[in-house]
Image: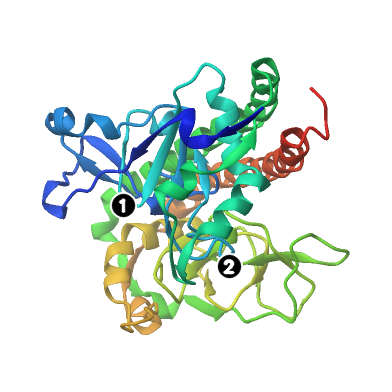
Amino acid sequence: MMVRLGDITEFINGGAWSDKEYTENGIPVVKVTNLKNGTVDLTEVNFIPESSLDRYGRHILRKGDLVIATVGSHPNLVASAAGRATIIPSIAENALLNQNALCIRTNNELLHQGYLGYLGKSDLFQGYVKSVGRGAANQVRIALGLIKEFSFHLPPLPTQRRIATILSAYDDLIENNLKRIGLLEEKARLHYIELMQNSSKWDKVRLEEFVSVVKGRKPANVLEQAEEESQLYLLLDTVERGKTLYTTDLSLPQSVITDVLMCMDGARSGLSFRGMVGAIGSTMAIWRSNSERVSGEFLYQFMKQNESAITQGNTGAAIPHANRKFILDMKMAIPPKKEAEYFDGLTLPMIKQINNLHNQNTKLRAARDILLPKLMSREIDV
């Protein structure tokens, strides 16, 4: 039967908080910027004190909620697109939803919450959202009333459950891998902190003396799907595991997993990421250690520990740019050879495991995304 989304769901707007209300700990606040890769990234998050829960309880998220970004760039621009759908994972359960996003929750026994989540990710809903968004390319807004008007064919409840069960099996594996990645990331960070306890006795050297920087370039072509002799094309979306792109342009600078990648241009300039194997795009750069005593992981941890200072040193007003000279002038305490080898021995297996888990998630997302439209359109009968 045909139904109207607003008739069988509850719509909950995100809340609005001032900077003065944020604290260092408490209840995490999920912003549109935290909605990444089809899940919630709580790496950089603000908090509201638990004492405020009485006032803001209506904005609390539940596992399985469908959250839609109502403000952002045009839906064709993946990184921060208005209309993108996120199914809330367990790590964001009991967090608070911020403004510019909308939580949709079933209030009717005819609609299964899991099915609702995948409906939000379906081509049918996403196509509708693209058609009703209004605004310029960098600031699109989707009206709440228009989302409520979305109409669709609702299959029987047992069918909804089966579809949700099949697709959620992939998302459960992805979420479990992300938790493992988070634990490994934290373990590597703690190894670095422990090692740096003795750093006051080490020589301090400017990064310029042992780090080379290679800026990426725009490729001759960009592909949505891998082709023969193509390789990963590394832009911010790719290194944040949001979208997989490829290129056959083999003349671009090449990154390896022991490199550090940095976003050099745009709103996220100065942010560092672990290396990936692929070709570097124009907004990214390879930061590579040429010292045997400074591994890629040690350099990465240094960059992350100093990320606030690095981003504050950005240049440019309308479009920020990472300040290469400022960063290369920074001094690093260089560990003795024995300590450096000990740190590398602890962390290298972790980095390989993190990379393997990310690769597994890429394959899981691809398999899920192939199944999703076929199940939702009933091309595959369940």
Disc 2 element: loop
Above or below, 329 against 269 in this view is below
Q: Position of residue 184 (x, y in %)?
A: 48, 38
Q: Which residue is mark 1?
A: 196
Above or below, 141 against 282 in this view is above
Quadrant into which the C terminus falls: top right
Q: Position of residue 299 (x, y in %)?
A: 44, 62
Task: Give me the residue at 62% from left, 47% from top.
Answer: 355
Count of residue discs? 2
Q: Which residue is mark 2?
A: 235
Residue 294 visible within the image: no
Task: Give me the residue at 38% from left, 80% from top.
Answer: 319
Residue 359 visible within the image: yes
Disc 1 element: helix
Mark 1 surroundings within 10 Å by alpha-carbon count, few (fewer than 14), some (14 through 19), many (20 or more): some
Task: Give me the residue at 34% from left, 50% from top.
Answer: 44
Mark 2 surroundings within 10 Å by alpha-carbon count, few (fewer than 14), some (14 through 19), many (20 or more): many
Nearer the observer, 165 or 190:
165
Above or below, 276 against 125 in this view is below
Q: Position of residue 300 (x, y in %)?
A: 45, 59
Amino acid under label 2?
Answer: Leu
Task: Give me the residue at 49% from left, 28% from top.
Answer: 8
Between the residue at mark 1 and the residue at mark 2, the CA separation in whole angstroms equals 31 Å
Amino acid under label 1?
Answer: Met
Compared across the picture, whether 206 is left or right of 354 comes to left
Q: Which mark is residue 39?
A: none
